[in-house]
Amino acid sequence: MKPDQYGYFGEFGGRFVPEVLVEALQQVEHGFAQAAADESFWGEYRAALRDFVGRPSPLLVAERFADPAGARIVLKREDLNHTGAHKINNTIGQGLLAVRMGKKKIIAETGAGQHGVATATIGARLGLDVTIFMGARDIERQAPNVRIMELLGARVQPVTSGTQTLKDATNEAFRYWTGHVEDTFYVIGSVVGAHPYPYMVREFQRVIGDEARTQMLERFGTLPVDLIACVGGGSNAIGLFTAFLDDASVRIWGIEAGGEGLESGKTAASIEAGSVGILHGSRSYVMQTPQGQILETHSISAGLDYPGIGPEHAYLHATGRVTYRAITDAQALVAYHRLAESEGIIPAVESAHALAAAYEIAKNGTPDQYVLVNLSGRGDKDIAQVASYEAELLARAES
C-alpha cells in the first residue's frame, strides 16, 4: 500500500511540522520520487547491498531454540549484514539519495546506536560529513557503538534534554535540520516522522521481506504460518511484513517493548499502552498523557525505547491485518540467553523481544509448519547493558 498524496495510511501519517521544514520535506519527496522512477538508482542500490552489505541475508532454522513439538522457527539473519543489523539497508538508500540531491552533509538520530553506525558507515563510504544525535543516557548504555561511529569519522552529539533517549535525539536532529536544510540531508532511521519518510524508509527496508518470501518458497516450498518482528518505530518489521501482507494464510505479529509491564507505567508499547496523537511530524499511536504530553518510556532495549510507532503500523493495527503484543524486559532476556546457548547466536535485545514471542507462538503449531522471525541485529552492543541490568535485578532480589 502507498500512502495517499498527503502521506496518510488511512487516518495515520501526514506532515505535522513547522513551516520552515515543509520545503525541505517536499525536496526529499520530490528527490525520492525521481530516484524511485530511475532504474539506474535502484541498480546502484542493489549493487551496494550485494557488494558492501553482503545480501541476501540467509535463513536459518533454529532447531534447538524451538519446542520440538511445535512449529519450526526460521530466522531471517539481518544480524549478518555489514554493521550488524537491518539499518544499513535504509542508510544506503538515503545516502545515495543525499548524493543525488547534491547534499554534502548527513545527520541522523540513534538510540541503540545501530542506525548511527550504519549512517556513519555509509557517510564514510560516500564521502559525506556525518553528525549523529544520541541521548546522553543511550551513549552510556551503548558505548561500543559510540566508539565505532567515532572511528568511522562521525561526530556524536550528546543530547541532554528530556529523558536523554531516542525521542530527545530525534527532537534535536529536527532542530538542527531546521537551520541547515540547504546542505544537509536528514537520514531518519525508522518508518516514523513526517511524509515521505515512513514510505521511503519502508521501500528501502522491504528487501528483507522480498528476499525472505522467495527464500521460504524456494527452500521449504511453503510460506510461514506466522511472521514475527520487533517494533519500536518499526522499520525492520515493516520491511519484513510488506511482502506478506496479501497472503491471507500468514499471521503477522508486531512485538512491542513491554518494559516492566503494561500496568507498571514503565513501558514503550505504543499501541497497547498509548493513544492516537502527533509525534515527530506524523499522526500515530503515541505514549502520552490525556493532555497530549509525551510520556517517559522504558525498555531494556535502547532501540525500542521510543514513545511512538510508525503510521503504517498504526494503520495495520486499525485494520486488524497485524496483531501487536508486548513482551517484557524479563521475557526478552530469557529469549536472549536461550538463543545464545541453543544456537550460538547472540541476538540484539531488540530482536530478543520477537524471539520470546516466537517461542510461545510456535508451540501452537506443528513440526511441518514454519514461524519466520526477523533477527534484526546482533547483540554485541548489548552485552554490557544486559550484564548491568541482570546484576541490578540480582541486587534487588537480595536486598
Image: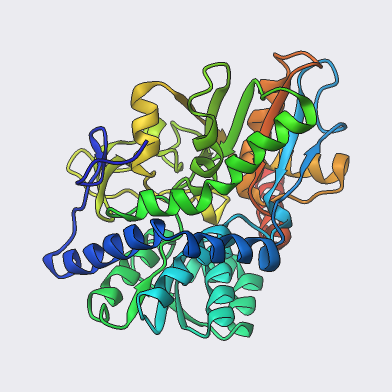
State which quarter of the image contains the N terminus: top left
- Comparing 330 with 316, the one in front is 316
Q: With respect to residue 311, does 193 lie above or below?
A: below
Residue placed at 82% from the left, 46% from the top? 340
Q: Is residue 135 visible?
A: no
Q: With respect to residue 37, does 60 lie above or below?
A: above
Image location (x, y in percent) of residue 321: 44, 23
Residue placed at 33% from the left, 62% from the top? 34
- Comparing 193 with 126, the one in front is 126
Image location (x, y in percent) of residue 296: 37, 51
Residue placed at 62% from the left, 39% from the top? 353
Q: With respect to residue 305, does 51 lie above or below?
A: below
In terms of image quadrants, where is residue 338? top right
Image location (x, y in percent) of residue 71: 76, 20
Colour scheme = rainbow
Residue placed at 27% from the left, 81% from the top? 180
- The count of marks equals 0
Determine whether, in the image, residue 202 is placed left or right of residue 211: left
Determine whether, in the image, residue 224 is placed left or right of residue 70: left
In terms of image quadrants, where is residue 94? bottom left
- Comparing 388 with 394, the one in front is 388
Image location (x, y in percent) of residue 35: 39, 62
Q: Is residue 164 visible?
A: yes
- Comparing 359 with 292, the one in front is 359
Q: With respect to residue 169, does 273 lie above or below?
A: above
Determine whether, in the image, residue 51 is placed left or right of residue 109: right
Q: Residue furthest left?
A: 19
